[in-house]
Image: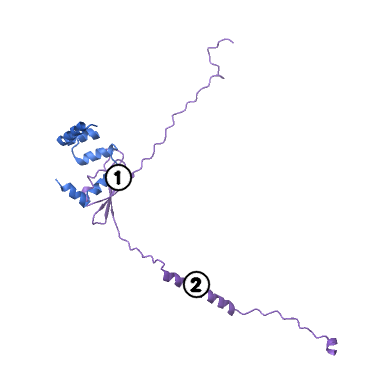
Chain colours: A blue, B purple
């Protein structure tokens, strides 16, 4: 992948992140709720229950919370 | 040999009708989806759970465990099971220390000594009498 393609992808992601995610993970257009998106990824076996649980547990980590609160 | 348009019965192998064996469907079992701690029960109804999975939730600060079970169909509503934890007193197991080991060996030795003393105290069986040698009169005359 050349640098120009990377820059193009970054610009698209910054402009419309949901569209990029929908294309990357083949999400239906009507999905907007994060829980619905995660449920769709689970049902299509794109992520595992264990991966989701680990990610949810990370949210309880104070360091992760500090990073998430940063704008 | 004349051409016989009819199949000879002995040459015609009638294929027995074999119904297609229906392979038994693998019994679908709910799989364990892991254990996760959540701050409150409100998070559980919206927590994503995969098809055929059971996720166990522990509520922080409360002795409550909730299972969220999702069936194998997207149209199945999740099932919730609620459990309350009960604390049990655990008996402390006394570990063998070097002092206790030495004490046990000494006790064993003392017991062996007492057993030996007990055998010594038992009445002895009478010894068989020795045959008395009768002096020969002929020898006495000398």
What is the x, y in percent for residue B103? 45, 72
Nearest the eye: A7 or A9 = A7
For residue A53, side relative to residue A10 (left or right): right
Q: Mark 1 packing: few (<14 Cα in 10 Å), some, or many (20+)?
A: some
What is the x, y in percent for residue B141? 85, 90
Give the farthest residue toward the top. Answer: B2
SS category of the residue bearing label 1: helix
Say if B57 sits above or below B86 in the image: above
Instruction: Report the chain holding disc 2.
Output: B
In the rendered image, residues at marks 1 and 2 fall on the same chain: no
The circle on residue B28 is none
Judging by the rendered image, the residue that carries numbered circle 1 is: A50
SS category of the residue bearing label 2: helix
Quarter of the picture containing the C terminus of chain B is bottom right
Question: Distance of mark 1 from mark 2, alpha carbons?
Answer: 56 Å
Image quadrant in which you'd find residue A15: top left
Mark 1 vs 2: CB contact within 8 A:
no
What is the x, y in percent for residue A55? 25, 46
What is the x, y in percent for residue A5? 21, 31
Q: Mark 2 packing: few (<14 Cα in 10 Å), some, or many (20+)?
A: few
Judging by the rendered image, the residue that carries numbered circle 2 is: B108
Residue at 17 percent of width and 33 percent of height: A12
């Amino acid at each position: 992948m050349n640098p120009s393609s990377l820059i193009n992808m970054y610009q698209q992601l910054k402009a419309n992140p949901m569209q990029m995610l929908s294309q990357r993970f083949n999400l239906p257009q009507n999905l907007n709720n994060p829980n619905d998106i995660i449920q769709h990824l689970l049902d299509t076996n794109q992520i595992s229950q264990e991966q989701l649980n680990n990610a949810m547990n990370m949210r309880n980590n104070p360091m992760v919370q500090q990073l998430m609160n940063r704008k | 040999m004349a051409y016989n348009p009819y199949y000879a019965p002995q040459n015609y192998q009638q294929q027995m009708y074999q119904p297609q064996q229906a392979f038994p469907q693998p019994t679908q079992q709910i799989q364990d989806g892991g254990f996760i701690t959540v701050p409150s029960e409100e998070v559980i109804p919206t927590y994503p759970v995969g098809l055929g999975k059971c996720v166990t939730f522990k509520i922080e600060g409360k002795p409550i465990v909730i299972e969220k079970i999702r069936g194998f169909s997207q149209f199945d509503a999740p099932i919730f099971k609620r459990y309350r934890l009960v604390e049990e007193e655990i008996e402390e197991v006394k570990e063998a220390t070097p002092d206790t080991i030495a004490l046990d060996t000494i006790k064993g030795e003392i017991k062996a000594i007492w057993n030996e003393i007990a055998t010594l105290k038992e009445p002895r069986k009478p010894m068989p009498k020795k045959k008395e040698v009768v002096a020969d009169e002929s020898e006495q005359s000398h």
